[in-house]
Image (cartoon, grey):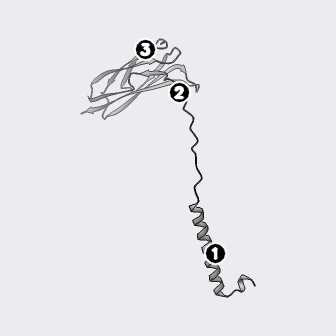
Amino acid sequence: MSIFSLPKTHFSSISTLVLAAFVGLTVFVSCAPAKSQTATPTPPAAPAKPAFVQWDKKMTDLGTVKKGEKRTLFFEYTNTSSEEIQIEIVDACECTKVDFPRGVIAPGGKGRLNVVFDSSEKEAAETIGINVVFKNIGPDGNPRIEVVEYKFDIAK
């Protein structure tokens, strides 16, 4: 006798039996103890390489500046690398004039960027970046570049 020739009452018994088996299996699987999951320990991070140069500060807040006013500021740095360093070029907004050391700075030596900001052409608050490009080449084969910044608000 095939399932297709069973009376309808047998179908309801079979479907009830299948449903009961499914529910039982679901309860059994969901109540089974979870496998213990052990976290794979993360290897300790390699010690960070010291910075190429260490800045006394990388951001200066000039506060509120009157339009047309000139402000002077500076950024000092220390050569923390094991090689002599030398700045090739310094790039900033045309409102910013930067005087920088042209010579070589030995490991442990210090340098200073002297900056003059002229707010004559400024209409709104801004953050100005100063890109310092060194002659030294980084591990990626490109010149080492450091960025220092200053910000200001304009009083009208």
Can residue 66 be seen here? The reply is no
Quarter of the image with the C terminus is top left
Q: Give, as a three-letter code, the residue at label 3.
A: Lys
Q: Residue 20: x percent and y percent?
A: 60, 74
Toward the viewer: 153 or 76?
A: 76
Residue at 27% from the left image edge and 25% from the top image edge: 69
Q: Identify which residue is drawn at 52% across, 25% down.
A: 49
At numbered mark 1, what does the secondary structure look like: helix, strand or loop? helix
Q: Position of residue 35 (x, y in %)?
A: 60, 53
Q: Position of residue 70 (x, y in %)?
A: 29, 23
Helix, strand or loop at label 2? It is: loop
**Horizontal arrangement in the rendering, residue 72 relative to residue 102 (left or right):** left
Q: Please tell me how crowded label 1 is: few (under 14), some (14-19), or many (20+) other residues with Cα within 10 Å.
A: few
Residue occupying the point 63% across, 82% down: 13
Q: Which residue is mark 2?
A: 47
Q: Tell whether label 2 touches label 3 (CB within 8 Å).
A: no
Question: Which residue was labeled with disc 1?
Answer: 18
What separation in Å lies between label 2 and label 1 (alpha carbons)? 61 Å
Q: Residue 19: image x %, image y %? A: 60, 74
Q: Nearer the viewer, residue 41 or 79?
A: 41
Task: Give the spatial CA distance, label 1 vs label 3.
Answer: 82 Å
41 relative position to 66: left or right: right
Q: Nearer the viewer, residue 118 or 56?
A: 56
> Counting residues from the N terminus, which is met first, the one under dot 1 or under dot 3?
1
| Circle nearer the viewer, 1 or 3 | 1
Residue type at mark 2 is: Pro
Which residue is identified by label 3? 110
